[in-house]
Image: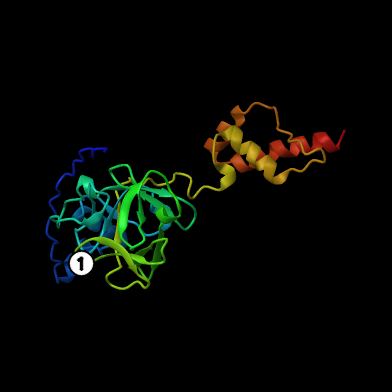
Amino acid sequence: MAEYEKVRVKKLCLKGEKVKSKKRKHKKHGRNETDSETKDIDALQHGGWWKVKSITEITGTVAIEFGNHTYVKALDNGLFTLGAPHDEGEGPSPEEILTAFPVNETKIALKSGYGKYIGVDKKGVVVGRSDAVGAMEQWEPIFQDGKLAILGNNGCFMSISDEEDAVCQSKTAGAGEYLSLRSMIQKIDDPYKDVPLEEQGSLSQIEVNYVRKFQKFQDKKLRINSGDRAQLEEAKTQGILHETLLDRRSKMKSDRYCK
């Protein structure tokens, strides 16, 4: 049986929120709390574990939270129960940490710290005893109206029983089936998210991208200007990259059709 690796979670101390002055002259110093700041505070209150909002965010290290600061815990017999409550600023314990894998666009697989995939048995009990992902080890996260419920392959939603065991026995999702899936994977902003697809990559690749976009040849072969690409570096610095790329393409077009 695989052992859990030790996970250190630094306890965070949150300062109290400052009371804004009612005096008009101090309003310029105040600022409204943004959605991003609210999410950051929520993550800090959970030891840096942030709440996922879409299935594309469910990958890597995750934990399933029912209620507040209580997480689904793996037992060495392959069953799952609700762990003890954590203090504010603490994240889940090692035995409450899972690994998520995307199966397709709508379903995921979950693996416990014991190296077993999590599924549902014939009685609707959540178990982690499989070495591979089969039909019963696939889960469908359902996001609706800001809430999340996880649907098992047996057509029932995950919840916690009166005995605090993890089960999938309800065909409908209510308060008992709503949960939070939290991730510890660092969010990295995509440096190219606001950059057109054609302008991603090196200057050499950018030129190829624009040739593919605008030039057409009967033999389906690209004609790339063999001139010194140093002028592209200079053009980029001067802010005339598009004009320079167009000029280089135009020369190749005239060479082909004006022989």
Q: Out of 90 and 213, give the one closest to the viewer.
A: 90
Q: Tell me: residue 11, above or below residue 147.
A: above
Instruction: Please say which color scheme the image uses.
Output: rainbow
Q: Position of 18 compared to 166: left or right?
A: left
Secondary structure of the residue carrying numbered label 1: helix
Give, as a three-letter code, the residue at label 1.
Answer: Lys
Q: Which residue is drawn at 39% across and 61% down?
A: 152
Q: Tell me: residue 42, above or below residue 215.
A: below
Does residue 86 appear in this view? yes
**Rendered-image quadrant of the N terminus:** top left
Q: Quadrant of residue 6?
A: top left
| Residue 245 x, y percent position in the rendering | 65, 39
- Residue marked by disc 1: 27
**Rendered-image quadrant of the C terminus:** top right
Q: Out of 96 and 27, give the one closest to the viewer.
A: 96
Q: Which residue is drawn at 69% across and 40% down?
A: 211
Q: Residue furthest right?
A: 259
Does residue 244 appear in this view? no
